[in-house]
Image (tube, grey):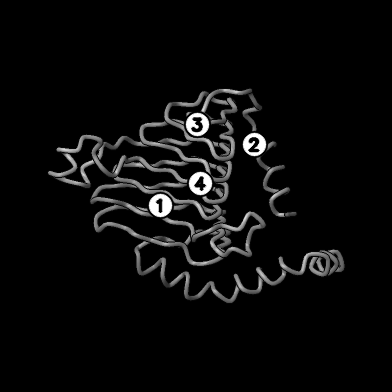
Amino acid sequence: MIDQLKAALATPWKASNELRRIGSVPWIRTAFLAHGVRWGQRWRIYGMPTLQLHRGSLLQLGDGLELRSWPASNPLMPNHPVVFATRRAGALIRLGDDCGLTGATLVAAERIEIGNRVLVGANATIVDTDFHPLDAARRRADINAGASAPVFVEDDVFIGMNAIILKGVRLGAGCVVGAGSVVTRDVAPGAIVAGNPAQVVGTGARTSAALDSSRRLADEG
């Protein structure tokens, strides 16, 4: 108890965030229920995410989820709430256990599946659709008929802030996507990629140990 009190005094913004989070649980939980989303175990939700769920689509969120939508909830200052959006009936967004997202945007026309212990950095974006056709004539015919292909993010992936993951991509287990990267093709397990378009710049361990360390560093920020 003494150690916890010392920690609270040393980082008063964390104590403020925790009090605010606890006080907001009832109405956030009610909002999830209204959208048909099961409330999981060990959730830590710092601000109501934006839920834009098409009727007939599905949002499944695992246990141990941490969502940070309030700017003050992370020193990287998310510039908008976490967004979960589905574009059509039958679309699916599924997250495994112990995932953390800060101001991230996930938009699925077909499917976005994320494994366990995945961290998505501040204001990163994952989309499985182009939204709009590339051809002008097709845009005139149907502006929302952009191509789409499922996105898969395997266990222990770390996606840096402001990164963009585009349609049809698979991120292999334990890979790392550098901040601000634009990923247009598959990333091998354990690879470290960066840039636009993202290229391999190194390799990393496929275990969750490095990601656990990253989570601790983020919490200490």
Residue 3 occupies which quadrant of the picture?
bottom right
Relative to 61, is 197 above or below? above
Which one is closest to the eye, mark 2 or mark 3? 3
Q: Residue at x 57, y 65 (%)?
A: 70
Residue 56 occupies which quadrant of the picture?
bottom left
Which one is closest to the eye, mark 3 or mark 1? 3
To which residue does mark 4 refer?
Answer: 124
Callout 2: SS: loop
Amino acid carrying label 1: it is: Gln
To which residue does mark 3 refer?
Answer: 196
Mark 3 or mark 4: name the one nearer the start of the chain: 4
Total tally of numbered discs in the picture: 4
To which residue does mark 1 refer?
Answer: 60
| Position of residue 129 measured from the top left corner of the image (x, y, whole percent) | 32, 41
Question: Image check: 25 left or right of 7?
Answer: left
Relative to 26, is 122 above or below? above
